[in-house]
Structure formats: C-alpha cells, structure tokens
Image: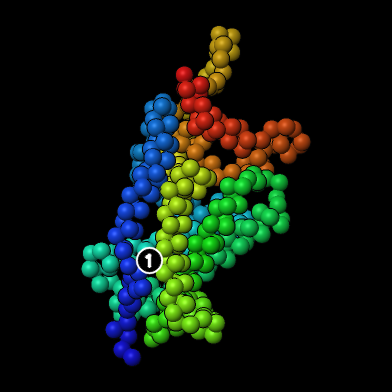
Amino acid sequence: MNSAEATRQIYWNISNVWAMYALLLPTAAVAGFGIYRHLSRWRRGLPAARFDHPSERIKLVLKHAVAQRRTARNIYVGLFHRLITYGFVILTIATIIVALDADFGTAIMRGNFYLYFQSFVVDIFGALVMVGTGMAAARRFIERPKMLVYTDEAALILVAIFLLCLQGFLIEGWRIAATNDPWGAWSPFGNLVARASHALMSVEAMQVAHRGAWWFHLATTFGFIAWLPYTKMMHIITAPLNIYTANLVPLGATLKNVDFEKTETFGVNSLKGFTWKDLLDLDACTECGRCTAVCPAHTVGKELSPRDIILGLRDLMHERPREAFG
C-alpha cells in the first residue's frame, strides 16, 4: 500500500450532516451566554492596568498554564492534569483539522500526516485523557484528600470526559471494522475495538451502532461544550487569562501607608471595591485547596479556609450580583 494515499471518508455512514450545523448554533449560543455572564461580572470591577509588558506575561503563561509548573509540584496531580490538558488540546486540534478538511476542502487528512498524527498520535492522546481522568477519579473517590471540594459537578465532569473519549474509540473502531480500513492498524485503540467487534458483531450491526454512537457523541459533545462555562471547567479559559494578567510588581511594593487613627474601614468590605482582576481571580479558582493547605492559621487548627472565602465571594458575585455590587 502507498502511504501517500492514506485517508478516510469523514462522514462515512452518516446522512443529514446539516443537522450537526443546526445543533451547533444553540450550542454556541448557550456557551457564549455563559462566557458573557462571566465577562459582565468582571466589567463591574474597578480599573486595573494588567496588560503591560506582554512578553513577560506570555512567559508566565508558558510557565504556569502550558508547562503547569505549580500543578506539577504534586507529581501525581501534575501528571494526570497534564495528561488531560495536553490530550484535550490534541483532540481539539484533530477536530479542527477534520472540520477544515470536510468544510473547506483543505485535503489535510492525507498521507503520512493522516497516519502519524490524525490516526496514531490522536489515538494515543485520547487514551491518555482516559488514563488521566481515571487517575483523577482515583484521587477524588479513593484517596479523598481533605483539601478538595466534593461536589456532584466535579464527579460528573470526570465521567463526561472519560465517556466522550470512550465514545470516540467505539465510533472509530466500528468504522474500521465495517469498512475493513487498510490503515486501521495506525489507530491502535480504535483497532482493538475493531478486532473485538469483528468477533462479536455483524457488519450491519456495526453500521447501526456506529451511526447511533456518532449522533450520540455529537449531542453529548455539544452538550458538554454548552455546559462548560457554567462549571469549574471554565478555568480552562479563566486560568490562562488570570496568569497573563498577573501582578508583575513584587508583593508589598504597592502597599499604601494607613492612618490607623483616621481610617474607619480597612481594606475592601464589598465586591464594589474589587478591581476587574480581583473578580477574574474569583472565577479562576479551581477549588484545588492548595491555598488552604498552606494557610498558617488553618494548619494550626483555626477555622479559616482561604479557598472557602474565595468560593463564597464567587458564589455571591454570580448568584446575588445586585446585592454584591449594589
């Protein structure tokens, strides 16, 4: 076989593809409104100059958002977080490539690029996302460290990510098996599904299963995207933005002298005194609990949790904005 001819039919076994674009519109509208909701809260904050020295800020993003230096201080947490993050980046790039090929005729999914990246690399990273979510679930449901916040939402996010990847492998495997794809071996995990399916299912059954799974995968993926801005997963947007707009001035350098004899109010006593960056900080919280774990008061048994303070302020900002901002 000539590898230069390697490719696949993008919408094999799928009809009425127009419905996908029809579903995309409400998905984008719901997700867009969720993002707008966050932006509208931040705009209520006071001014703050946080876009100077762009080169330094980009370095911070590369260090803490891309390389994830802080998360990696805990080897186990750093590993599964990177597996999920980098895996999702690769899967997103692969999806964009499919769209460019299908909708704009770019013919990218051809030859060695299709084999090495779109088949092999994407398969590997899809599996790594599943491994990462499994590790995260083990920490959350078995180890159960005290610093975490245990919510149904967090559990549902992990389950959703795992199942979305699993759906992808099933769809890929049934396509490989039903079409006897000569390049199927380049997708190692999809090929495993294909081999198992050959032994258990007829070609007709695989076609029916593939079609149903494809539409179900589309619906659940769009649902996940629409849901994202309303969950802690919003931090995939707010965390890099929060890092980019970090305070570059050394801690304590901007503190003002306070006249304790004349000052009636110390610090900020409502969200109206927060800058837009302070409000962004609230939304960027990932509920990891690291701040509480190293809080001196908390470590000696005092009833103080910086994380819970942040989460309380965030809830106030979103659930009772009129009360919060006046």
Give the percent coordinates (x, y) of residue 49. Answer: 37, 32
Which residue shows up at 44% across the image and 79% down it?
Answer: 204
Q: Which residue is mark 1?
A: 94
Residue furthest to the top: 262
Tell me if I can see residue 202 in this picture.
Answer: yes
* Number of numbered markers: 1
Amino acid at the residue labelled 1: Ala
Classify 139 as above or below 128. above
Q: Which secondary structure, mark 1?
A: helix
Classify 89 as above or below 52. below
Which residue shows up at 45% across the image and 62% down it?
Answer: 217
Which residue shows up at 57% across the image and 66% down it?
Answer: 131
Residue furthest to the left: 105
Considering depth in this image, is 322 or 81 the residue closer to the camera?
A: 322
Give the percent coordinates (x, y) of residue 146. Answer: 71, 46
Which residue shows up at 47% across the image and 63% down it?
Answer: 87
Q: Which of the 4 quarters of the picture holds residue 238?
A: top left
- For the N terminus, give its image quadrant: bottom left
